Every structure is written in structure tokens, then in C-alpha cells.
């Protein structure tokens, strides 16, 4: 049996058909869902179209405009003028006459010192060169190359340096190098014995050197070279009295030996001997025999 709808019921449908489902409205009016759908159509209501339109064309959400926060600028400090002004003064130092004189003297002294150093360097250059030649000759002599060693020692003596001790050494080594018999056991001449004695002395064989030089002195009693080398060997052995006696004889035979002995480091054991010191003092022409 069809339901008779009242005006209030129809008004209720119009007010709620969009918010309630067919089932909810049908239950409210105690009718079937199909009957509720038919009633809504008869009332000219289009629930489906309105819902579809609402879904497909939603109203845009309001756009909220955010303002970018601004950072307040820090207030700039205005320059503060100092109430104190610096009183700057430039002082010019004036050199006194005494200070100027002292400065010039120091400058002059420094220049003279540098000049002396350069002159000494130039003076020592030949000595350094001669020392290299001497060392090369000694090495060749120790290697048994006597002839080559003799050339080095002779070259040094041809252009002698100011170092008299080095000259004396070169002369002694030259004598040892030029004799091919210096190392032979059968020595016949005083020259051979002298050369062999120098070699033994340089090798540190003081006893052997004194023995062979003693024999050489008997064969050549006036040879000042033998006297000089014997004095060296005796001084090294500790016999100061015999050493000074031999050195005195060598100087008497050849005054140059006084200069050699004064610069010869091998005579260091006699430096404290009064007689040696007396012999090393410069002699006048009247004292030279």
C-alpha cells in the first residue's frame, strides 16, 4: 500500500536528502529504500548529480599568504670622535762629533781587519796548494811509487811555500824517494843510510833510525842532514842532551838548520829545554861560523 506523504515529511526529505543516505531516510519514514528513492525523484530532487558536482568541483581552499619574516637591521654605531688627540712628534737624532769619530774609527778598523783577512787568505793559498802536493807525494811513496813521489816533492821544492817546516819535510821525503836502495838491507853509502834512516823515523822505528844514522854519521861526519835527523830521533826518544848536542852541530855546519828546527813540529819534545830555546834565538852575523 502506497504511503501518503505529508507536507512536513516532504520538507524533512528536502532538508536532509543530501546529508543522509536513502537507507537512513527510508528507515526514518519506515519505508523501503526503493520507495525512498522513488519519492526523492518525484520531488524533483537530484541527489546523485548534486553529489557528483560537489565532488568534481570542490571549492578551492583559501590561500593563506605568508609574509617573509624580515630581520631588523642592526643599528650602525656612529663613529665616536676621541676627545684625546695624540701629540705625535718626530725627533731627529743629531750625532755628536765624538760619536761620529768613534763610528768612523770602528768602520775603518773593520775594513782593515777584512783587508788583512783577505791578504792572509791569499798568502796561505800557496801553502795549501803545496800541502796537497806533499800529501800526494807521501801517498805515492807509501804505495812504493818512489819515482812519482820524488817528482811531487821536487815540484814543491822548486816553488817552496812560506811554511819552512813543510819545505823541510819535503826535502827529507825527497831524499827517501830518490834512492831505490832505501828499503834494501845492504846499505853501503852514507847517503843510502841517511835515506833509510828517514824512512825508519817516519815509520816510527826510532831505535832502527838511530842505529842506521849512527853508522851513516861515521861515514860522513860533516853531513849536516844526518846530524839534523839524528837530533830529531834523539829528541823523540827522550835523550834531550844528545839531541841538543846533535842539533847544535847541525846548526854550526849549516845555519839554515836553525830556521828549520824553529818551525819543525818534530822538535816539540825539546821546546821546554833551555839549551834548545837558546839555540832558537836569532843570531847575529858575528855568531855564525
Image (spheres, rainbow, N blue to C red):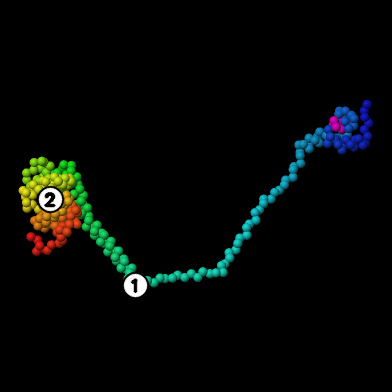
- Are circles 2 and 1 on residues that touch, CB within 8 Å? no
Specify the segment rendered in magenta. 22-26
Magenta-colored stretch includes residue 117: no
Residue 5 coordinates in the image, percent (x, y): 92, 33
Q: Main secondary structure of the magenta part?
A: helix
* Viewport quadrant of the N terminus: top right
Residue 7 coordinates in the image, percent (x, y): 93, 36
- Residue at x 16% of width, y 57% of height: 276
Q: Residues within 10 Å of mark 2 (few under 14, many from 20)?
A: many
Q: Which mark is residue 207?
A: none
Q: Which residue is mark 2?
A: 230
- Residue at x 19% of width, y 53% of height: 269
Q: Residue furthest bottom?
A: 97
* Viewport quadrant of the C terminus: bottom left
| Residue 282 sits in quarter | bottom left
Left or right of 264 in this view: 19: right
Residue 228 coordinates in the image, percent (x, y): 12, 52
| Residue 271 sits in quarter | bottom left
- Residue at x 50% of width, y 70% of height: 87
Q: Which residue is mark 1?
A: 98
Residue 96 coordinates in the image, percent (x, y): 36, 72
Between circles 2 and 1, the one closer to the viewer is: 2
- Residue at x 18% of width, y 49% of height: 134
- Judge whether residue 41 can be spotted in this image: no
Secondary structure category for the residue under label 2: helix
Amino acid at each position: 500500500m502506497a504511503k501518503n506523504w505529508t507536507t512536513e515529511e516532504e520538507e524533512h526529505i528536502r532538508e536532509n536528502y543530501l546529508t543522509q543516505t536513502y537507507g537512513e531516510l527510508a528507515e526514518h519514514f519506515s519505508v523501503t529504500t526503493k520507495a525512498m528513492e522513488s519519492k526523492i525523484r518525484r520531488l524533483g530532487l537530484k541527489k546523485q548529480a548534486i553529489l557528483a558536482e560537489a565532488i568534481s568541483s570542490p571549492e578551492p581552499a583559501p590561500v593563506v599568504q605568508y609574509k617573509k619574516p624580515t630581520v631588523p637591521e642592526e643599528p650602525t654605531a656612529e663613529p665616536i670622535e676621541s676627545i684625546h688627540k695624540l701629540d705625535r712628534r718626530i725627533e731627529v737624532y743629531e750625532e755628536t762629533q765624538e760619536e761620529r769619530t768613534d763610528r768612523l774609527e770602528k768602520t775603518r778598523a773593520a775594513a782593515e781587519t777584512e783587508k788583512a783577512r783577505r791578504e792572509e787568505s791569499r798568502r796561505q793559498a800557496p801553502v795549501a796548494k803545496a800541502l796537497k802536493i806533499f800529501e800526494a807525494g807521501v801517498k805515492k811513496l807509501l804505495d812504493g811509487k818512489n819515482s812519482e813521489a820524488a817528482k811531487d816533492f821536487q815540484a814543491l821544492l822548486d816553488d817552496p811555500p812560506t811554511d819552512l817546516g813543510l819545505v823541510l819535510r819535503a826535502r827529507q821525503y825527497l831524499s827517501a824517494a830518490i834512492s831505490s836502495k832505501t828499503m834494501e838491507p845492504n846499505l853501503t853509502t852514507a847517503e843510502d843510510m841517511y835515506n833509510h834512516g828517514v824512512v825508519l823515523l817516519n815509520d816510527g822505528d826510532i831505535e832502527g833510525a838511530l842505529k842506521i844514522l849512527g853508522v851513516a854519521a861515521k861515514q860522513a861526519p860533516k853531513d849536516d842532514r844526518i846530524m839534523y835527523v839524528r837530533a830529531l830521533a834523539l829528541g823523540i826518544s827522550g835523550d834531550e842532551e844528545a839531541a841538543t848536542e846533535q842539533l847544535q852541530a847541525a846548526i854550526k855546519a849549516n845555519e839554515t838548520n836553525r830556521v828549520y828546527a824553529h818551525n819543525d813540529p818534530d822538535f816539540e819534545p825539546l821546546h821546554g829545554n833551555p839549551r834548545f830555546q837558546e839555540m832558537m834565538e836569532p843570531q847575529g852575523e858575528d855568531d855564525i861560523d
